[in-house]
Amino acid sequence: AQKITQTQPGMFVQEKEAVTLDCTYDTSDPSYGLFWYKQPSSGEMIFLIYQGSYDQQNATEGRYSLNFQKARKSANLVISASQLGDSAMYFCAMRERSPTGKLIFGQGTTLQVKP
Amino acid sequence: GAGVSQSPSNKVTEKGKDVELRCDPISGHTALYWYRQRLGQGLEFLIYFQGNSAPDKSGLPSDRFSAERTGESVSTLTIQRTQQEDSAVYLCASSYSDQPQHFGDGTRLSIL
C-alpha cells in the first residue's frame, strides 16, 4: 500500500538558517510524483514543489529544493534562508500513476522559525 | 478571484442534522477532489470527480457521505445525520491534467 511518513512532528529553525524536513514514501508503482504543500495557521494549502519519479535532477523553486533519493525512497524538503513567514505546517504527498491522481498525505511537520 | 472557492468557511451544527458543503473549482479544471483533515492530521482522500462523474469514491467513510458535481463546475459534499466524528476541515482541490492540485481554504465543520 502507498504510504508517506513524516517522522518530525515539530521542528525549530533560526531565522536565516536552512532547514530540512524529512519525508519517506512507500510504493510499488515505478511512476509516481511527490509534492510538498505548506499550510499556514489560516488553513489554506499552498503548493510548493513537485518531483517526478523519473526526473533526473532534484526540483528547485526559489528557496525550496527537494532532496530526492530514489533508492532510499526519500524526498526531503530543504528550505534555505528561513523567514518568519515560513512558520507553518508542511505536508509531503505522493501521487501514484493512477487514473484518479489522488494524493496520499503524510501527517505533517510543524515548522517554527525563531527570530 | 481565480482560486478554488469553498463555502461556508465555518459550519456549526447539531448532531443528527444534514450539512451541505460547496466547492467552486478553478475554471477549466476538469478534476475535482474532496479531502478531510482531522485536527492535527494529514489530509484523507474522500472522492474524485472527472467532469461530472465520480470514478473513485473509495475514501467516503460511510453511506452518510455523498457528493455530486455539475458538469465541470460546482461540487457539493453532503453529510447526512452528522456525527461528532465528522468534525473536521473539509478541503476541496481542483487540477487540470497532471498539474498540481490547487486547494480551497476549506470548510471547518463542528458537530455539537
Image (tube, coloured by chain):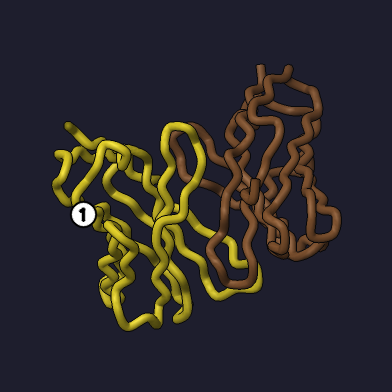
- Rendered shade, chain B: brown
Coordinates of residue A68 in the picture (x, y in percent): 29, 70
B60 and B9: which is toward the camera: B9
Q: Residue most toward the front?
A: B1
B5 and B60: which is toward the camera: B5
Q: Is residue A25 left or right of residue B23?
A: left
Which residue corresponds to mark 1? A80
Which quarter shows the N terminus of chain B?
top right
The quarter of the picture where residue A80 lies is bottom left
Tell me if residue A42 comes above or below residue A45 in the rendering: above
Tell me if residue B84 comes above or below residue A44 in the rendering: above
Point 69% across, 62% down: residue: B29
Coordinates of residue A97 in the picture (x, y in percent): 55, 75
- Rendered shade, chain A: yellow
Point 37% across, 41% down: residue: A89
Q: Chain of mark 1?
A: A
